[in-house]
Image: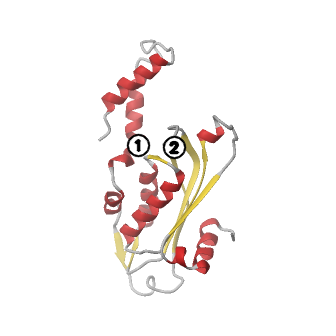
């Protein structure tokens, strides 16, 4: 569980270390405000991937018209999320997640895919792990091995500090099942996820 009191204490200490006066008007409530914000922003830390899968695994049994057919995929694209880089605790922003899976016996509610992406992103992360975590949760929630994830985003640690290259985008993919083992399925998945051939 996130310890808000400890966070507030350490934020106050950081303010002092920066040479600020934590008792001045504008900063007096900042430590507890930051603690409450962190509780919201990092709520995904409280859940394992399996717990997220169980939380959002509401599925619908369907007949063979929808599932278990060659070439039948579900794609949800351009889900907006943000996260925080675990190396600098800086924002990863303008980030979109696109997910594809091949249903097996059941389908998951579309809003649950967006909720899975959001919950996984609300941790200290690296973009590559966001993709692998989403793929793992989707496999557990849907019972399908065939999952793909494409993520595109900008990183504050590249755009606001260090090399300072605003607009630089990072794209990562994670493919499991047929999307990993079959080049033609992976190519189709990339086209469906990105809207353009790779």
Q: Is residue 151 above or below residue 6?
A: below
Tell me the number on the disc at residue 85. Answer: 2
Where's the N terminus, which quadrant? Answer: top left
Where's the C terminus, which quadrant? Answer: bottom right
In the foreground, 91 or 125: 125
Query: Where's residue 115, x and y in %?
Result: 42, 57
Q: Is residue 177 above or below residue 118?
A: below
Tell me which residue sits at (42%, 30%) in the image.
34
Q: Residues within 10 Å of mark 1 (few under 14, many from 20)?
A: some
Relative to 147, is 194 on the left or the right? right
Dot in front, 1 or 2: 2
Count of numbered marks? 2
Q: Earlier in the sequence, mark 1 or mark 2?
A: 1
Tell me which residue sits at (58%, 58%) in the image.
172
| Coloration mode | secondary structure
Relative to 41, is 158 on the left or the right? right
Query: Where's residue 62, x and y in %?
Result: 38, 81
Tell me which residue sits at (44%, 85%) in the image.
68
Residue 150 occupies quadrant: bottom right
Tell me the number on the disc at residue 42. Answer: 1
* Contact check, label 1 and label 2, Cβ < 8 Å: no
Q: Residues within 10 Å of mark 2 (few under 14, many from 20)?
A: some
Determine whether the residue tagged by mark 1 lies in a helix, strand or loop: loop
Query: Where's residue 102, x and y in %?
Result: 48, 77
In the foreground, 43 or 13: 13
In space, the residues marked 1 and 2 are separated at their CA atoms by 12 Å
């Amino acid at each position: 569980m996130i310890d808000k009191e400890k966070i507030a204490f350490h934020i106050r200490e950081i303010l002092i270390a920066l040479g600020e006066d934590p008792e001045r008007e504008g900063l007096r409530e900042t430590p507890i405000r930051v603690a409450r914000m962190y509780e919201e922003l990092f709520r995904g830390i409280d859940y394992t991937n399996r717990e997220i899968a169980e939380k959002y695994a509401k599925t619908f049994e369907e007949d063979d018209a929808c599932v278990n057919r060659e070439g039948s995929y579900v794609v949800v694209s351009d889900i907006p999320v943000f996260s925080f880089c675990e190396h600098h605790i800086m924002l990863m922003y303008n980030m979109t997640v696109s997910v594809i899976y091949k249903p097996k016996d059941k389908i998951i509610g579309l809003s649950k895919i967006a909720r899975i992406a959001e919950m996984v992103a609300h941790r200290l992360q690296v973009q590559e792990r966001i993709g692998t975590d989403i793929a793992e949760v989707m496999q557990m929630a849907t019972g399908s091995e065939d999952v793909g994830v494409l993520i595109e985003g900008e990183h504050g640690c590249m755009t606001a500090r260090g090399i300072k290259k605003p607009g630089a985008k990072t794209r990562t993919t994670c493919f499991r099942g047929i999307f990993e083992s079959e080049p033609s399925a992976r190519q189709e998945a990339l086209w469906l996820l990105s809207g353009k051939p790779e």
